[in-house]
Amino acid sequence: MKEERDTGRNNVLIVEAVLIAILVMALTVLLVLYFEKDAPEQRGEVSLEEMETESSEGVEVLPEPEPVYAYERIYLEDSKLGDIAVPTIPGVERHTYSWENLREENGRYLYESDEWQSRTGVDVSYFQGDIDWERVKADGIDFAIIRLGFRGYGTGNIVIDEQFISNINEALEAGLEVGVYFFSQAVNEEEASREAETVLGMIEPYQITLPVFYDLEIIDDNGSRTKGLSADAMTANARAFCGIIEDAGYEAAYYAAQRTALLKYDMGQLTDYDLWYVQSGPEPVIPYHFTVWQYTSEGQVDGIDGNVSLNLYFERKNTDGDEE
């Protein structure tokens, strides 16, 4: 009997212990809930409901950021690959021309906006033969870019254009502004520097008011010394030539068609020099700034037999609407 009483007493104690534990846990939960309801204010935090209220009362809410893309792209057409996407180069100045301001009159382009206006010019070499520059001027041509000479793509010899002297003298006498270009086939900086020194020696007697242009074009013929010339060499040659020209007090620029500008020159290293850009109309497809645009090689100008390349020279207006 004693053992039965002890067992019953033990069971009662266990039940009481369980009840006490349950009561303690319940009290703990209640205390936690009580203090948590004031916790955000005590910690200086704001509830989601309060944030929404403050936002509606004029507190600035920042918008979601726009997605950032790694680069913009320029599209050009390739004969084998079709459409090619070329990334743009950070740090290269963009042009501010708007092509809705480009118009065509009598087979020639003209450009005028609040910021820019154009002049019309030709670029010539001995291929155009004898030129009547007075008639050229009377036909609305404002300037001429005259080939001074070239380096042979096979021999590497420097040759002065046989029409250079007559062209520059007669163009200046007719009242045209004049620049010159040299057709380079330099394979290194030393040769490009020699070409620049040749140019300086030839133009010294003349009033050159437009840039001296460096025209390096890859000749893809067997035996061509520039076939396969690297982009690094192209860029280094242009820098060497243009640097010598500018050190002598002249303005220097370089000539490039779209593919050459985008694929063979590192334009980020040529930002000190203007670009003479070559692409057939109706409008250039390149975002970078250029000063001269050669838009056709099939122009017609009185005083020049056959076809001739036509160019626009862009000049900025000042605030009074006159050219700078």
Image: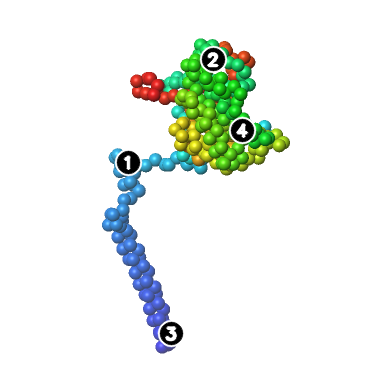
Write the residue at 40% across / 77% down: 14
Mark earlier in primary sequence (4, 2): 2
Mark earlier in primary sequence (3, 1): 3
Which residue is tagged 4?
A: 158
Residue 185 location (% of width, % of height): 62, 35
* Badge 2: residue crowd in 10 Å (few <14, some 14–19, many ≥20): many
Q: Is residue 286 visible?
A: no
Q: Which mark is residue 60?
A: 1
Give the CA distance from mark 2 to mark 3: 136 Å
Residue 294 location (% of width, % of height): 55, 24
Q: How is the image coloured?
A: rainbow
Write the residue at 52% across / 12% down: 134
Instruction: Specify the amino acid type for callout 3.
Output: Glu
- Seen from the viewer's position, the closer of residues 74 and 108 is 108
* Badge 4: residue crowd in 10 Å (few <14, some 14–19, many ≥20): many
Q: Are marks 3 and 4 in contact (CB under 8 Å)?
A: no
Q: Which mark is residue 260?
A: none
Judge depth for marks 3 and 4 and give the one in front: 4
Instruction: Specify the amino acid type for callout 2.
Output: Trp
Residue 48 location (% of width, % of height): 35, 48
Which residue is tagged 3?
A: 4
**Mark 1 element type:** loop
Mark earlier in primary sequence (4, 1): 1
> How many numbered marks does the figure carry?
4
**Quadrant holding the C terminus:** top left
Judge depth for marks 4 and 1 and give the one in front: 4
**Mark 3 element type:** helix
Mark earlier in primary sequence (3, 4): 3
* Badge 3: residue crowd in 10 Å (few <14, some 14–19, many ≥20): few
Give the CA distance from mark 3 to mark 1: 77 Å
